């Protein structure tokens, strides 16, 4: 309802709350917001808390912990991310409502000095609610509906209810869905909210080889030198680039280490992404106790993903001879779990062969695949450990799209 002093409106019914959420959705679609990851997450959170009656809990430290994943004891003086974000949001909201076309929309405001949003109607709508003189503006769709209400002398409370019903009818139900984080955001939440740099542990190969060096004065002239190099597989770089690029959009930093140089201490310092299977010992160690894990014959000519619930079944198997042809069906494990050895979250992107690893990296940044994953898991899947078995068809050494074969949560 409107306050006599401030004209601030407190939505009370579900219809009124839905109208606010629809306006929030409209606001976040604007270029001032939709290109940012941080601002929509912040604004969605504070609006949801306010509509739930928990506006008093919106303090700087609470927002730092809940929205940005800060440690509960972090120093708000040294880390002003909440204050800076709120200030930018206030500026962008002001810019939004100053643009033509938003004159008759509900105001979603973030007052200076507070993190609790406020809601109100624009002056044009309030004049219809408490009419003195009809404003000299062209009738909008909202005013067209409001005028008969004004003429019949219907109270402003009923007008608000009518407005809210209109909002619901035009799509407010989708605003509730948009307020909920996407499947991608839910999957990567432990990494996005962590303030520590993400560790990428990628397979490396140490070998003595040669390198061609070109003459700076004459690039056509070159010489061959022996050089001790550490190399990585190009197919393992693809998941690294995909995932690192995704995390960068959330402002997360990362570091890359070869598996031979990675220690348990490294993995205790930050969340980790493990890429590759049979050439990455950390992947094999982490997945060994899990329901789905990697296995092979002693001769290492047959490789497969084993199901602990049915260990004799080898339906996700790859023969080394088939891989050599460049055309084969590959399988991969994508896992996200809290590692009991480090007490840190770990994501695994590992194929039986290279094609599977590429497909796993593609899956982890594909919003449509993530929504499919969410649809095949329990409602509280984002708070569980999980394993996803993928399959992909590799043709001439190129991976096809990843397809979900099986999902397990615990």
Image (cartoon, grey):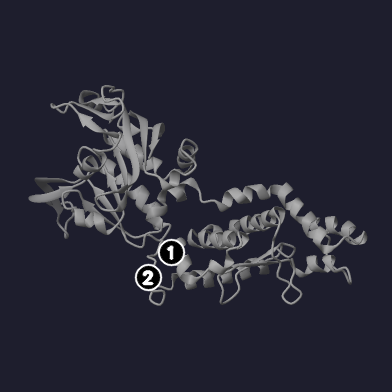
Residue at horizontal 48%, vertical 40%?
374
* Position of 161 relative to 377 (above/below): below
Mark on residue 98?
none
Q: Which residue is mark 2?
A: 74
Image location of residue 197, percent across then percent down? 31, 60
Callout 2: few (<14), some (14-19), or many (20+) C-alpha neighbours within 10 Å? few
Q: Which residue is mark 1?
A: 65
Residue at horizontal 39%, vertical 54%?
190
Residue at horizontal 36%, vertical 63%?
195
Q: Which quadrant is the N terminus positioned in?
A: bottom right
* Position of 286 relative to 181 (above/below): above
Residue 159: quadrant of the picture = bottom right
Q: Which quadrant is the C terminus positioned in?
A: top left
Badge 1 marks a residue whose secondary structure is: helix
Image location of residue 299, percent across then percent down? 13, 26
Query: In this image, 291 relative to 213: left or right?
Result: right
Structural distance between the alpha carbons of marks 2 and 1: 9 Å
Residue 366: quadrant of the picture = top left
Callout count:
2
Q: Nearer the viewer, residue 28 or 281?
A: 281
Image location of residue 259, percent across then percent down? 19, 48
Image location of residue 203, percent across then percent down? 21, 45
Callout 1: few (<14), some (14-19), or many (20+) C-alpha neighbours within 10 Å? some
Mark 1 and mark 2 in contact (Cβ < 8 Å)? yes
Query: In this image, 399 relative to 218: left or right?
Result: right
Q: Earlier in the sequence, mark 2 or mark 1?
A: 1
Residue 351 in sight from this viewpoint: yes
Residue 328 in sight from this viewpoint: no
Residue 21: quadrant of the picture = bottom right
Query: In this image, 240 relative to 265: left or right?
Result: right
Badge 2 marks a residue whose secondary structure is: loop
Residue at horizontal 39%, vertical 57%?
248
């Amino acid at each position: 309802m409107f306050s006599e002093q401030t004209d601030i409106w407190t939505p009370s019914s579900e219809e009124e709350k839905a109208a606010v959420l629809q306006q929030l959705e409209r606001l976040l679609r604007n270029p001032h917001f939709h290109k940012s990851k941080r601002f929509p997450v912040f604004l969605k959170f504070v609006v949801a808390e306010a509509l739930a009656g928990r506006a008093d809990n919106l303090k700087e430290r609470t927002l730092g912990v809940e929205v940005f994943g800060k440690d509960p004891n972090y120093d708000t003086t040294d880390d002003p991310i909440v204050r800076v974000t709120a200030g930018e949001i206030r500026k962008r909201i002001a810019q939004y409502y100053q643009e033509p076309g938003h004159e008759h929309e509900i105001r979603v405001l973030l007052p200076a000095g507070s993190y609790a949003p406020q809601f109100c109607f624009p002056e044009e709508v309030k004049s219809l609610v408490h009419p003195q003189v009809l404003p000299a503006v062209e009738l909008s769709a909202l005013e067209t509906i409001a005028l008969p209400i004004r003429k019949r002398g219907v109270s402003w409370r009923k007008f608000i209810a009518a407005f809210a019903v209109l909002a619901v009818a035009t799509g407010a139900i989708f605003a509730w869905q948009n307020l909920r984080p996407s499947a991608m955001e839910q999957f990567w939440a432990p990494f996005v909210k962590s303030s520590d740099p993400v560790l990428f542990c990628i397979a490396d190969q140490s070998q003595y080889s040669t390198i061609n060096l070109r003459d700076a004065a004459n690039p056509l002239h070159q010489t061959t030198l022996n050089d001790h190099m550490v190399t990585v597989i190009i197919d393992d770089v693809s998941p690294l680039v995909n995932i690192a690029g995704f995390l960068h959009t959330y402002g997360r930093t990362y570091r890359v280490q070869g598996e031979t140089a990675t220690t348990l201490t490294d993995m205790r310092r930050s969340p980790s992404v493990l890429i590759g299977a049979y050439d990455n010992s950390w992947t094999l160690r982490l997945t060994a106790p899990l329901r789905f894990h990697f296995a092979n014959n002693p001769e290492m000519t047959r490789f497969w993903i084993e199901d602990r619930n049915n260990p004799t079944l080898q339906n996700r198997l790859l023969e080394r001879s088939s891989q050599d042809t460049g055309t084969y069906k590959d399988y991969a494990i994508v896992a996200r779990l809290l590692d009991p050895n480090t007490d840190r979250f770990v994501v695994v992107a590992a194929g039986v062969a290279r094609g599977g690893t590429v497909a796993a990296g593609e899956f982890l940044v594909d919003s449509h695949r993530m929504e499919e994953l969410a649809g095949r898991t329990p409602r509280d899947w984002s708070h569980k450990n999980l394993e996803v078995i993928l399959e992909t068809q590799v043709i001439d050494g190129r991976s096809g799209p990843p397809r979900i074969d099986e999902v397990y949560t615990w």
